[in-house]
Image (cartoon, helix red, strand yellow):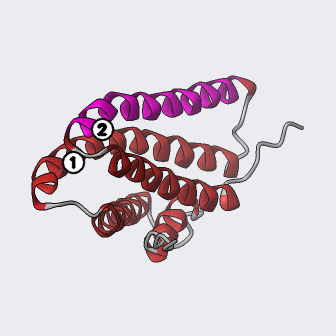
Amino acid sequence: MKKIPKLNGLALLVVIAGVFSTGLAATAAQQDDEIAQGREMMREGRLDIVRSEIHLTEEESAAFWPLYGKYRDETDAIQDRYAAMITEYVRRYDNADLSNEYADELLDTFLAVKYEKLDVQKKYLPEFRAILPALKVARLYQLENKLNAEIDAQLALVVPLVDPS
């Protein structure tokens, strides 16, 4: 079986560095720009991987890409909320500004994002099935899952755990 290429590692590092930098060398606006640039590089990397791995015919491609664009727009909007949540968490963690009330808010936001992403996947599944064979739809969802898992794994390495003490 052919190995799926990874997302652009540089893009991921730019995002992580931007989100988790302490601000010593960059202003908040510079950090926001770095995060936006890194996220755009990740989006482009995701598109490149899907393009190279989904193996569409010309007819399938004509129907797929506009739909996939809408799907990604919705998913990216949710991911933007997730990135903002992580950024805020790390800022508060660095400032020792965590509380039980904030932890409740954080958990609610985290789970809402997870459910919203799943809702978008479920929403688009019948539409993808209408234009692609089931094996290609399954491959698309596998690709999406693998790319999301890679991003989550990298974040898990650098996001600090809450200290309950």
Q: CA distance from mark 1 to mark 2?
A: 9 Å
Mark 2 neighbour density, 10 Å: few (under 14) some (14–19) many (20 or more): some
Up/down of 128 relative to 15, above or below = above
Question: Camera-side residue: 59 or 9?
Answer: 59
The magenta stretch is: 101-130
Q: What residue is at 51 percent from the left and 73 percent from the top?
A: 3
Q: Main secondary structure of the magenta part?
A: helix
Q: Amino acid at mark 2?
A: Glu
Q: Position of residue 62 (x, y in %)?
A: 10, 53
Give coordinates of residue 69: x percent, y percent.
21, 48
- Examine the structure image and report whether residue 127 is included in the region drawn in magenta: yes
Quarter occupied by residue 58: bottom left
As helix, strand or loop, the secondary structure at mark 1 comes to helix
Up-down relation of residue 126 to residue 37 (above or below): above
- In the visual, does 19 lie left or right of 162? left
Residue under circle 2?
Answer: 74
| Left or right for 101, reference 147 | right
| Location of residue 140 in the rendering, given as x and y in whole percent from the top left corner | 37, 51
- Which mark identifies residue 153? none
**Residue depicted at x 52% and y 40%:** 85
152 up-or-down from 108: above or below: below
Q: Which mark is residue 69?
A: 1
- Residue extending furthest right? 165
